[in-house]
Image (spheres, rainbow, N blue to C red):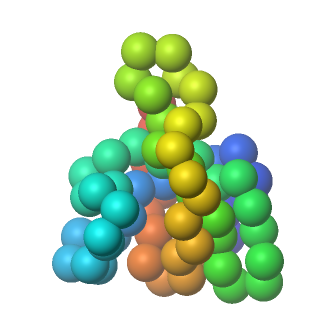
Amino acid sequence: MFAAGSYVMVREGVSVAEGLEGVLCRVCGVHDDLRDIRRVDAATGAVIGIEVRFSVSELVSASR
């Protein structure tokens, strides 16, 4: 569903300890139905921070 390089956000209602609520992220790893995502820096577009793993059902598509 979300290929590596896709822009996503964590679905509303999913609890996230890493502060990713409402933050634009990018998929940087694909493992079956799991996606590793990292935050996108708003100024540069670069991915920053640690990778966090989510199920595809916990993510929604987003655009930069």
Q: Looking at the image, which residue is at 29% across and 78% down?
A: 14
Does the image show residue 7? no
Q: Looking at the image, which residue is at 52% across and 44% down?
A: 49
- Counting every numbered tag in the picture gives 0
- Residue 41: x %, y % from top left: 45, 28
- Residue 5: x %, y % from top left: 70, 45
Q: Looking at the image, which residue is at 75% across and 61% down?
A: 29
**Image quarter in which the N terminus is found:** bottom right
Q: Looking at the image, which residue is at 58% across and 35% down?
A: 47
Left or right relative to 34: residue 55 = left
Examine the image and state in which quarter residue 55 appears: bottom right
Q: Residue furthest left?
A: 13
- Residue 18: x %, y % from top left: 35, 62
Left or right relative to 50: residue 20 = left
The residue closer to the viewer here, 52 or 45, is 52
Q: Is residue 44 above or below residue 56?
A: above
Left or right relative to 21: residue 42 = right
Does the image show residue 54? yes
The residue closer to the viewer here, 46 or 61, is 46
Q: Is residue 56 above or below residue 44?
A: below
Q: Is residue 53 above or below residue 10?
A: below
The residue closer to the viewer here, 52 or 59, is 52
- Residue 52: x %, y % from top left: 54, 65
